[in-house]
Image (spheres, rainbow, N blue to C red):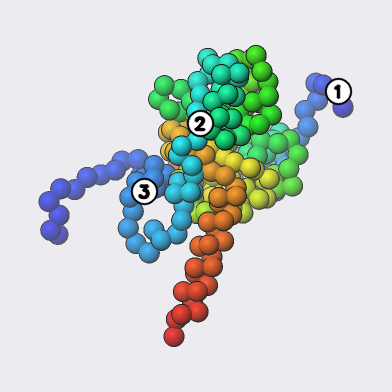
Amino acid sequence: MGFNDVYDYVDGKLDWLAAGLPTEGTNTLVPRAGDVARSDAPTCRMDETIDDVQERVKAGGWDACVVVNDEHVVMGLLRSKELEEKGRPVEHVMRPGPSTFRPHVSILEMATFMREHDLKNSPVTTSDGRLVGLLYREDAEREAHESHSHDDHAAGDAP
Amino acid sequence: MTSAQVMKTACKVCGVEVERCAGCERERCEAMICYRCLRLQLGQSLAHPHVHGG
């Protein structure tokens, strides 16, 4: 068929998408959670104290911090409330095992979901739990709105 | 309610009993959803094609 090297991605198509790996086709034009999530979101380790983390997080203008291990796998989340627990270890304060979302979920779905569940931010991870970024609802809603407006214009331009 | 009693509520999609929402981790949520329905709703996993696993 003209292919020289053929590989079998044994974990399947969904895992490929969930890892944020490249895709082709018209569907790739739809913005995804992984595209909009802030990849520079602050992270910390479980053995740090809230005091150290809070200083770093606030200095960067953030209001949340993702707790990760050495492999960058998400272990927990510190939101504003947890970041106020001064003098305590991160491990004792963090929200353990937060709900995470895959990078391939469309931004429109994420925006709707975050609004319905009143989520300010959510970690986006690969299917093996590695952090991709922190998705903020304001970013998701803005991107979903822009994407929707763009679709409307495109439809209006059609003969 | 005593401390030994746990608040139970149901997933709005499939009706399965859950203790907290899989989406926002709250014990009370208007859009309560179980972990399985959350994965399926957002296309993060697929429904198993056969009950017997074939």
Q: Are marks 2 and 3 on the same chain?
A: yes
Check disc 1 and report the residue beneath it: B2
Observer-nearest of B37 and B52? B37
Task: Give the amino acid type for the residue marked by disc 1 in the picture.
Answer: Thr
Residue A38's x, y, as percent?
Answer: 49, 42
From this viewpoint, which residue is outermost toward the front?
Answer: A59
Check disc 2 and report the residue beneath it: A42
Could you say which quadrant of the image residue B17 lies in?
top right
Check disc 3 and report the residue beneath it: A13
Q: Residue at x 68, y 20 (%)?
A: A85
Can residue B21 be seen here?
yes
From this viewpoint, which residue is outermost toward the bottom?
Answer: A159
Q: Is residue A48 left or right of residue A21?
A: right
Task: Give the amino acid type for the residue marked by disc 2 in the picture.
Answer: Pro
**What element does badge 1 sit on?**
loop
Q: CA distance from mark 3 to mark 1?
A: 48 Å
From this viewpoint, which residue is outermost toward the right?
Answer: B1
Q: Nearer the viewer, mark 2 or mark 3?
A: 2
